[in-house]
Amino acid sequence: MKTIVAGNWKMNLDPAQSIDLVSSLKAGLVKFPNTECVIFPPYTSITLLSELLSGSIIKLGAQNIHPEESGAFTGEVSALMIKNYCSHVILGHSERRIIFGETDDFINRKVLTSLKSGITPILCVGETLKQREAGLALSVCLDQLIKGLAGIKPENLSQVVVAYEPVWAIGTGMSASPVIAQEIMGSLRNQFSEKISKEISEIPFLYGGSVNADNAIDFAKEKDINGALVGGASLDANAFIQIAKSMVDGK
Ligand code: PGA
């Protein structure tokens, strides 16, 4: 199984700051076997960074797309616009679900569009603290996973990546314990495999939510964790490089 270390910059860094960060990443990130490092800058930096990263081991991704290919959707960006620059796209992030009201159906349309365009979707699922406390963590995540991946043929499932990101752990400094993350991620794999498609066992599952240079290694040691989706710590080159190293060393 391949390892993926993804850096979600969110709405941070202008083009000049993006170039600075990528220059440091290029200087410090070495090629790890069977591992992909992907950064997700804001759209305004994508074409610039694409030139800077040509021939580099670092891949580029987008933080979102609209499900349609073009049209009257003010402020949106389509898969066709980014497909020459981006190998991956983050979909269903809890900030999109909660702040921007994205539904499972809308997210599913984006997942299908990204696959059609040859872009690997990283589908995020995760429960809120309230849902966890009500004992609903697994059922909420499984429901998001099944709805997000609806309509994908089993043979195309291998092109998808899943990220488990408990909402209460994002940007809070309060990461899930590796044991909690493993418990949900292992069960998600098993239940999806039983109910929908066995092919799920072959795709990478990433953990996200307050991953940092110190705790990454403990997540990497868990059986069903194949990488990390990193927010805050991906804005610091040294931290991101250390996380990538830990994700490989821990396996
Ligand atoms: P965080 O964000 O690492 O800052 O918690 C993770 C994410 O939102 O993908």
Image: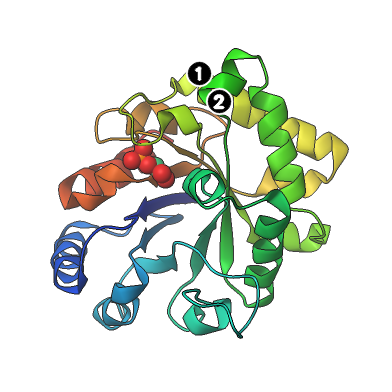
Q: Is residue 126 above or below residue 58?
A: above
Quadrant in which residue 86 is drawn? bottom left
Whether residue 221 is visible: no
Residues 238 and 43: in front is 43
| Residue at 72% from the left image edge and 27% from the top image edge | 139
Q: Amino acid at mark 2?
A: Gln
Crowd around label 1: few <14 · some 14–19 · many ≥20 (10 Å): few
Relative image position of residue 31 (x, y in whole percent)? 31, 59
Drawn side of residue 170 relative to residue 97, left or right? left
Drawn side of residue 90 relative to residue 131, left or right? left
Drawn side of residue 88 relative to residue 112, left or right? left
| Residue at 63% from the left image edge and 78% from the top image edge | 117
Disc 2: residue Cβ within 8 A of ligand 1's nearest atom:
no
Quadrant in which residue 9 is drawn? bottom left
Q: Amino acid at mark 1?
A: Val
How many labels sit on residues? 2
Whether residue 147 is visible: yes
Instruction: Answer whether labels 2 and 1 touch (C-beta < 8 Å).
Output: yes
Residue hosting label 1: 179
Residue hosting label 2: 182
Relative image position of residue 134 (x, y in whole percent)? 64, 14
Relative image position of residue 103 (x, y in whole percent)? 67, 50
Crowd around label 2: few <14 · some 14–19 · many ≥20 (10 Å): many
